[in-house]
Amino acid sequence: MTPDLIPLALVGLMHIAQFAVASVMANKDVGTGYTTSPRDRAPSREMRTVTARMLRAYDNHVQMFPFFAAALLALHVTGQNSSLTLAASWVYLAARLIYIPAYALGWKPWRSYVWIVAMASVAALFLAALF
């Protein structure tokens, strides 16, 4: 595997781990009867605030991950990867790893700043692919 794809693989594993942790927390809070159902109704028990935040942090990454992956793959396919793009990829991974507890623990406004760092990293990757 080339160095520029290692952060992509690690972000993918982080995504899976984040989903697993949030799912276990949700199962604990609302019960497997609800989480294994088609969810046609609201759960009979409420989730803890931290669980709801973990699920929202995961949903946020569901939205961001395709942009990161597309930027890295565009760079890889065109051979435009560089030390700058590699650094931006690692910064994205670090920011997303920090974002999870930042969201779960309600770090405001820091959570938003961490999100901006991750998005700026993705923007840098796309700009590098264009120029």
Image (cartoon, rainbow, N blue to C red):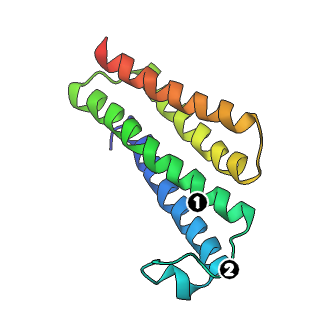
Q: Is residue 57 left or right of residue 38?
A: right
Residue 38: mark: none
Q: In this view, does 128 lie to the left or right of 52?
A: left
Query: Residue flagged by tag 2: what amino acid is it?
Result: Arg
Which residue of the protein is positioned furthest toward the top in this rendering? 131
Q: Which residue is drawn at 73% across and 62% down?
A: 49
Residue 45: mark: 2
Number of marks drawn:
2
* Circles 1, 2 touching at the beta carbon (< 8 Å): no
> Quadrant of the image for the N terminus?
top left
Query: Residue 77: x and y, percent?
Result: 22, 31
Tell which circle, 1 or 2, labels the residue nearer the N-terminal end.
Answer: 2
Query: Residue flagged by tag 1: what amino acid is it?
Result: Leu
| Label 2 secondary element | loop
Query: Residue 53: x and y, percent?
Result: 66, 56
Query: Residue 58: x and y, percent?
Result: 54, 54
Q: How much space separates mark 1 and mark 2, taking CA atoms? A: 16 Å
Q: Residue at x 41, y 49 (%)?
A: 9
Dot 1 crowding, Cα within 10 Å, few <14, some 14–19, many 20+: many
Which residue of the protein is positioned furthest toward the bottom in this rendering? 33
The image quadrant that residue 24 belongs to is bottom right
> Quadrant of the image for the C terminus?
top left
Q: Residue at x 76, y 48 (%)?
A: 106
Residue under numbered circle 1: 55
Q: Residue at x 59, y 29 (%)?
A: 116
On screen, residue 24 above or below 62: below
On screen, residue 58 above or below 30: above
On screen, residue 39 above or below 1: below
| Label 1 secondary element | helix
Which residue of the protein is positioned furthest toward the front in this rendering? 41
The image quadrant that residue 71 belongs to is top left
